[in-house]
Amino acid sequence: MRAFLVRWVGNAAALTLLPLWEGSGVHVESFWAALLAILLWGLLNALVKPFLGLFKMLTCLVHALTLGLSTLLVAFALNIALFVALGYGKVLPGFWVDTPWDGVRAALILSLVGFLLNHLVREGAERR
């Protein structure tokens, strides 16, 4: 539970700080809006995961030929598309992006932050 909270708050803090970057095109009115956006983004990602398993089964040959890279690219593309839909569609009050490309850039940055947070949380758990 602690690892989940660290990842959730860390990603929300990154999303809150993103508008400070000049020309980011991301607008977050409050930390609570960022928490809600990150939570909804995570829930949507969890709903998409079973479809990736179906994608692997249907494209087994492509998956084998690309050594799994095709599934990684599809997962990453879906991740970016969900973030853009959340921000550009103004689904959540207090969070939006100006253009879809701003959403893509923000999703790339947040994916990197999420990767680093996962790595740090995993290292902390291994030390105990």
Image (tube, rainbow, N blue to C red):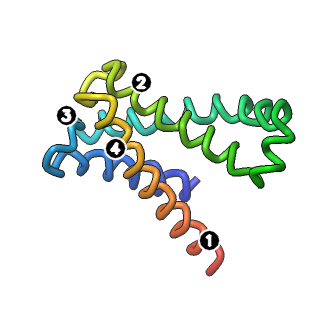
Query: Which mark lies nearer to you, 2 or 3?
Result: 2
3D distance between C-alphas at marks 1 and 2: 34 Å
The residue where tag 3 is placed is 29
* Closer to the camera in the image, 71 or 121: 71
Q: Quadrant of residue 103?
A: top left
Residue 85 - label: 2
Dot 3, how many residues are within 10 Å of its Cα: few (below 14), some (14-19), or many (20+)?
few
Q: Residue at x 39, y 55 (%)?
A: 10
Q: Residue at x 80, y 38 (%)?
A: 56
Residue 15 visible in this rendered orientation of the protein:
yes
3D distance between C-alphas at marks 4 and 1: 28 Å
Dot 1, how many residues are within 10 Å of its Cα: few (below 14), some (14-19), or many (20+)?
few
Question: Residue 21 vs residue 81: left or right?
Answer: left
Say what amino acid the circle numbered 2 marks.
Answer: Ala
Q: Are marks 4 and 2 in contact (CB under 8 Å)?
A: no
3D distance between C-alphas at marks 4 and 2: 12 Å
Residue 125 - label: 1
In the image, residue 38 sits, relative to residue 97, either above or below, namely: below
N-terminal of the pair, mark 4 or mark 2, is 2
Say what amino acid the circle numbered 1 marks.
Answer: Ala
Q: Quadrant of residue 60?
A: top right
Question: Residue 108 vs residue 47: left or right?
Answer: left
In x, y percent, where is residue 128? Answer: 64, 79
3D distance between C-alphas at marks 4 and 3: 16 Å
Residue 106 - label: 4
